[in-house]
Image (cartoon, rainbow, N blue to C red):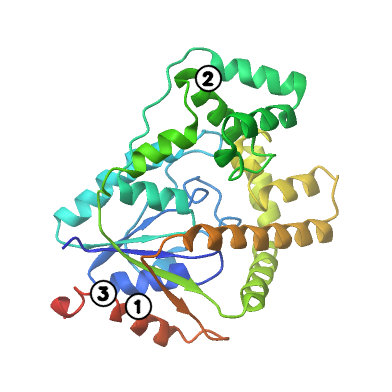
Amino acid sequence: MEKIVCVVGPTASGKTALAVQLAKLLDGEVVSCDSMQIYRGMDIGTAKPTLAEMEGIPHHMLDVVDPQTPFSVGQYVAMADPIVRDILDRGKTVILAGGTGLYADSLIAGRTFAPLPATGQREALEAQAKQEGLAALYCRLKQVDPEIAGKIAPSDQKRILRALEVYELTGKPLSWHNAQTRLQPPKYTPIWIGLDFPDRQVLYDRINRRVEQMITAGLLKEVQALLDLGIPTTATSMQAIGYRQILAVIQESLPLDQAVAQIQQESRRYAKRQLTWFRRNPAIHWIFQSDPPDFSTSLSTALSYLPFFDTLL
C-alpha cells in the first residue's frame, strides 16, 4: 500500500512535532500543506518549522514562492504531487502535514485545476468590485451559488471573484464543478491522523501563547523586512492573520496590544473553521491530547493506526 500519513488539525495543535517524529520512525519526508508557509520570508507569523524543529527531516513545499506572488490550490497540487510521487518511488513514507484542509484534500484526491482562459472576465469583476463594493458581488454569488457562498467569508475577494468567474465563463456554479470532481476516485489512500484537545479552551490558550511568542520572536521586524523588500501591502500574503494586524501597527493605525488581541481572536476563529473542515472527513483518526500534551502517548497512538508500521521495524 502507499505509505502516506496525513497529520492534520487546527493551528497550535502540535502537527509539526508529530509529523517530524513519524517521519523519523517511518523513514519519511514531510510535505507541508499550509497555504502561508509556502511564502519565503514569512516564518514567524506562519509558525514555519525551524531547522531545529525539523530535526534533519527533509521538508517540502516550504518557501516555494515570493510573498508578492499569487498562489492557488491548483498551483499547490501541481507542485506538491510530483514531490509526493518521488518520495513514494524512493520507497519512503510521505508525511503530509498542515492545517490547510483544501490543500490536503485536493492533493490526496488528485484534483486538477485547469486555468481559466484569459477573457478579461476577472478584470471586469475586479472593476465591478471597486465600483459597487465587494458586498454586492458577494450577494450575487449567494444567488448563483449559495453553497460556495456559504463557505466563503464576505471579505474574501479572491475567492468570491474566482467563484463568479467560473460561473460567468462556464455557465455552471463552482459547487457543480466541485461535485463532479468529487465523483472521481481519490488518487491516493492515506492514513489520516487528526490532533485536537477535548477542551476547546486548552487549544485557545495555546493559540494565545503562540501569538505572544510570535511578537517576542520579532514578528514586527519580519513584517517591516517584507515591506523593505517592496512587498505591496495589498498582496494576498500580507492580508494573512498576523501580518495584516502588524502592518496596521507599523502604519500607526492600531496599537500593538490591540493588534495582539485581534491576532489571537482571528487565530481562534480560524482554528474553529479548520476543525469544521476536517471533521467532515470520516477517515480521520482523532487523537485528543491531554493538558499539557503527553507527546509520547500521542505518538504511540498515531503509530497504532498505521498498518504498515510493523513492516518497517
- Residue 40 image point, x, y percent: 50, 45
Q: Name above or below for residue 299 compared with residue 261.
A: below
Q: Which residue is mark 1?
A: 302
Q: Are marks 1 and 3 in contact (CB under 8 Å)?
A: yes
Q: Residue at x 26, y 76 (%)?
A: 25
Judging from the image, what secondary structure is the residue with disc 2 in?
helix
Q: Which residue is mark 3?
A: 306
- Residue 73 image point, x, y percent: 44, 40
Q: Nearer the viewer, residue 66 or 304?
A: 304
In which quadrant will I find the N terminus?
A: bottom left
Q: Is residue 257 left or right of residue 121?
A: right
Q: CA distance from mark 1 to mark 2?
A: 45 Å
Q: Amino acid at mark 2?
A: Glu
Q: Name above or below for residue 268 compared with residue 231.
A: below
Q: Which residue is mark 2?
A: 168
- Residue 255 image point, x, y percent: 86, 54
- First reached walking from the N terminus: tag 3 or tag 2: 2
Q: Residue at x 61, y 15 (%)?
A: 124
- First reached walking from the N terminus: tag 1 or tag 2: 2
- Residue 230: in sight, yes or no? no
Q: Amino acid at mark 3?
A: Leu
Q: Residue at x 46, y 47 (%)?
A: 38
Q: Amino acid at mark 1?
A: Ala
Judging from the image, what secondary structure is the residue with disc 1 in?
helix
Q: Name above or below for residue 198 compared with residue 154.
A: below
Q: Nearer the viewer, residue 106 or 29?
A: 106
Q: CA distance from mark 3 to mark 2?
A: 45 Å
Q: How many numbered circles are shown?
A: 3
